Image (cartoon, grey):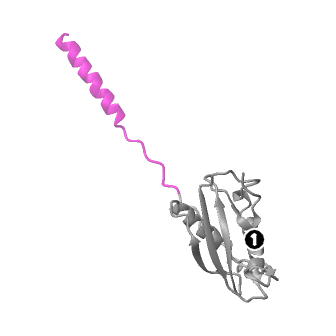
Amino acid sequence: MSATRRLALVAACTAAVLAGCTSVPLPPPEAPPPVVVAPPAEPAPAVVEAPAPARRLSTADSPRAYRRDAAGHLYAQNPDRIWKGRMPPLLYAVGVLQVEVGRDGQVERVDWMRAPRHAPEVIAEIERTVRAAAPYPVPARMGRVVWTDTWLWHKSGRFQLDTLTEGQD
């Protein structure tokens, strides 16, 4: 490339760079949006709590009679966890649990008479299920009650209580 051509190329590049450097006045900054003051909010209406559901009363006069009310209550609280029909011959776990229910239907104590020690997760789940189902029917004629039931536990996590069992094959 000749020196003249090189000089012309450099001049053209310099002109292009300088042409890009021309200053154009910037538009004036936008005015901030006007501040709108909202009218004061109306006070929130007072929250009225719904009345507590009426507790069911048990007219059972013995722990054995109360056991039926308590088992029915547990079934109503866990309909999707109840084994339907006769249980298979081999169960994953069988446990015998005593539950003390106070005057208000709340669980006061649980004691294992026969815990399925080979399945500690079942022990924990049964205790959780019993406590979560509270309040139980209020033992009106006894004040407080200790009821005992046998839990028949399938490996699927579904169960039956001996009080309401449909049998076993």
Viewer-closest of 14 and 37: 37
Residue 92 against residue 53 in the figure, above or below: above
The quarter of the displayed image where residue 44 is located: bottom right
The quarter of the displayed image where residue 71 is located: bottom right
Please tell me how crowded label 1 is: few (under 14), some (14-19), or many (20+) other residues with Cα within 10 Å. some
Residue at the farthest left position: 3
| Label 1 SS | helix
The quarter of the image holding the N terminus is top left
Q: Is residue 28 magenta?
A: yes
Residue 117 against residue 50 in the figure, above or below: above
Q: Look at the magenta stretch and give its main secondary structure.
A: helix
| Residue 48 appears in the picture as rendered | no
Viewer-closest of 8 and 56: 56
Q: Position of residue 2 (x, y in %)?
A: 18, 10
Residue type at mark 1?
Answer: His
- What's the magenta region? 1-30
Residue 52 against residue 155 in the figure, above or below: below
